[in-house]
Image: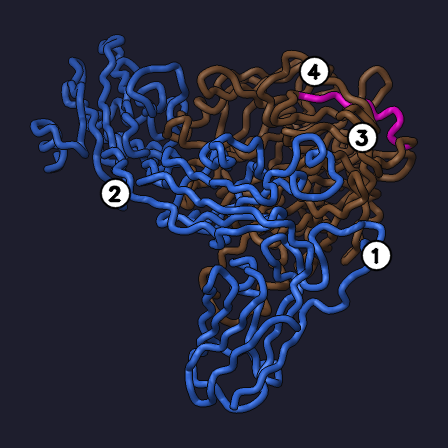
Chain colours: A blue, B brown
Amino acid sequence: MSLLFLLCLFVPLPFCVTSSFSAQTTQPQISIRWVPQEGGKMAVELAGLNAVALRPMASWTPQQFQRVLSVYAGATDAGLPPMLGKYRIEANALRFEPQFALEPGVTYRAVFQPGQVPGNSAAGNSVTIATFTPRPRDLTPSTLVAQIYPSADELPENLLKFYIHFSAPMRRGNIYDHIHLLDAMGKAIELPFLEIDEELWNQDFTRLTLFIDPGRIKRGVKPLEEIGPSLEAGKTYRLVIDREWRDSNGAPLKTSFEKSFRVTPPDRQAPDPAQWNIATPAANSREALTISFPEPMEHALAQRMIVVATESGEPIQGTVSLENQERQWKFVPATAWRRGRHNLIIQTTIEDLAGNNIGKLFDVDVFNSVQRQLTSQTVKLSFDIR
Amino acid sequence: MKRFTLFIALAVIAFGLSSLKAEAKLTSGMLEGAAKFQSMGPLAFGPDGILFVADTKAAAIIALSTGDTKPAAAGKLLKVDAINQKIAALLGTAADQILIEDMVINPISHNAYLAVSRGRGADAVPVLVRVKTDGAPEVVSLENVKFSRADLPDAPADKQVGQGNRQNNPRRESITDIGYLNGRLFIAGLANEEFSSTLRSIAFPFKTVDNGTQVEIYHGAHGQFETRAPVRTFTTFKIGKEDHLLAAYTCTPLVQFPVSDLKPGAKIMGKTIAELGNRNRPLDMIVYQKDGKTYLLMANSSRGVMKITTDSIDKVEAIKAPVPDGGKKGLTYETIEGWTGVDQLDRFDAGHVAVLRRGEGGSLNLEALVLP
């Protein structure tokens, strides 16, 4: 017997809630217990089976094993199927190894039917249950909304999206229940966002993209005519993230988060790099190259759609940051600037806050534009390092 | 599913005549072994029990040869209450710890296939679950299967950036729906940064070099403004002799465009044939026939299930001007009484539709209902 098992018998350790342990009459050595496996997993072991019992088991199907030993998620019998796992015979024991890691806080029941053990029919219908509850997750709230972009407190009426950044990974499912857009009177705006079942998270679930329903932005479409725009110029709003939103542990947020902003008239001007102001650093320094935009740019795209390159087009490595409410783009090179001509290569799909691209508005008359395509995917701005 | 039926059925009949040959051809280039997934999202059946599974996290489509090609016994329906609780129990977890991403019916065997996430965070484990008409869910083992994989091309944008947080690019593309038609797989997608609607088309069997084609879809909405809204769900439909895609956008205009227009780099203007209302999201869509007529059945977030007549689909004029007082224009529809809480639907057999619907206490019920 393992030390852990002996401990489980006599000490109610939180990670080892083994209970209802008992042995049966005809095979007095048969015992059921939860045992740790490699990698922190747990298994159920039915020990003390004799050769009469083990011999036929060598050719058993999972269904036959389940009649002897089944493991269930849930503290009580709700008539649900047993969980998946592998049955293995080791020495004189039958082991059940769950296919998936056990869920913290869920009570698992290993149900042993002694009467189903070959050669043990005299044991009758008495059932032995061993339960185990993995330590519940720590539900102390610790995750916060770290930032919401755009960070400006004045946003255009045709704002296209928000990015919500969290300090730790969040969990999926029913997220839109926790996002509220309120007017100045505290009244909720009805369905302002594009509710996408897939939920637009980044890879590690720390950033959510929240599109404002384009039907509530775009001119001439039915939702806008029937229920009006989500945002109206001249009014103030609060984007509220309520603290009931759960992080990946299942804990609520530490606090709710509010972003207040005033709405300005719609932005129907495409970004124009010719209007950008480039401040160039000195040669042989690692000072930042700075681009000042006349309007805030979309945070995520501005970070990756502007490349600094040598005159021959070789990208220069460095670090990008956005400042001044996304009106200023800064690039610090990994190595000192070399004297000479450089280029900024900008993808035309970079966006302002209204989703307007270089040379193309988000919201344009289809019959004037649908056949027109930008011939170039990038535009180039040159600057000299002296 | 979100999805397909009419053409799946036709495909089944067509392929049925030479199914062994066809099956061999479709699976001949497949790998055998463990099919690995990072996630499982939209599902769609092709011919011969081939199941397409969208792995959104990996930006890939995996075609699985399920081998589930035994025709269904006549008259066997599907009714499983609290399927989410049963699947959670099978996976050894609590019902609130799983998400059912999509559900499709194998048009041959009538078994339901569900893409399930065990867990709701970044460490969620994707699981493919099959529910036979006896109602017992089972996990489909992917350890030793025939499969092929098509990786979707990343946005060209990504490749041009050589600086900044390149090791942690937060850009991802979601796949909102997939569907198979005549040797091609259609994939509707949406990125979590640039706002655009893309529809890719990939030849099947997958070729190693074929990254598919990408198109942007536009539809002339009211007031004739260009819309790049994402396609939520789509299905295929024959209008006259030509295959069309019918796409439901997130704000419920129903738009049609010919499949033949989906060419690499094409910019397509679809025809808006119906406005199905606001405060509402389309969830899933199938085509079916009843009493010699063809209908669309669409599940919506707030209007229940809509039955849309297609009688005049070839004649209906594109909606180009605002519809006054919220009245109907284009194709007409009726809302099916009592069909509440339907999240997913797929055609079950000629007379039934399988639905996944929300019941009491957070339970999800899987059942085959008589087509309205």
Q: Distance between the residues labelled 3 and 1?
A: 26 Å
- Closer to the observer: label 3 or label 1? 3
Q: Indicate left or right for A180 with B75 as reference.
A: left
Q: Which amino acid does label 4 sit on?
A: Ile
- In the image, which residues are magenta? B305-314
Position of the N terminus of chain B by quadrant: top right
Q: What residue type is labelled 1?
A: Gln
Seen from the viewer's position, the closer of residues A68 and A134 is: A134
Residue at mark 1: A371
Chain ID at mark 3: B
- Mark 4 secondary-structure assignment: loop
Q: Which residue is drawn at 48% across and 76% down?
A: A317
Residue at mark 3: B323
Q: Do labels 3 and 1 share a chain?
A: no
Q: What residue type is labelled 3?
A: Val
Q: Residues within 10 Å of mark 3 (few under 14, many from 20)?
A: some
Could you tell me if the residues under marks 4 and 1 are in contact, i.e. CB atoms within 8 Å? no
Q: Which residue is drawn at 52% across and 91% down?
A: A386
Q: Which residue is drawn at 65% across and 24% down?
A: B110
Q: Do labels 4 and 3 share a chain?
A: yes
Q: Indicate left or right for B290 with A97 as reference.
A: right
Residue A285 visible (yes or no): yes
- Closer to the observer: label 4 or label 1? 1
- Residue positioned most to the left: A10
- Closer to the observer: label 4 or label 2? 4
Q: What residue type is labelled 2?
A: Gly
Residue at mark 2: A40
Chain ID at mark 2: A
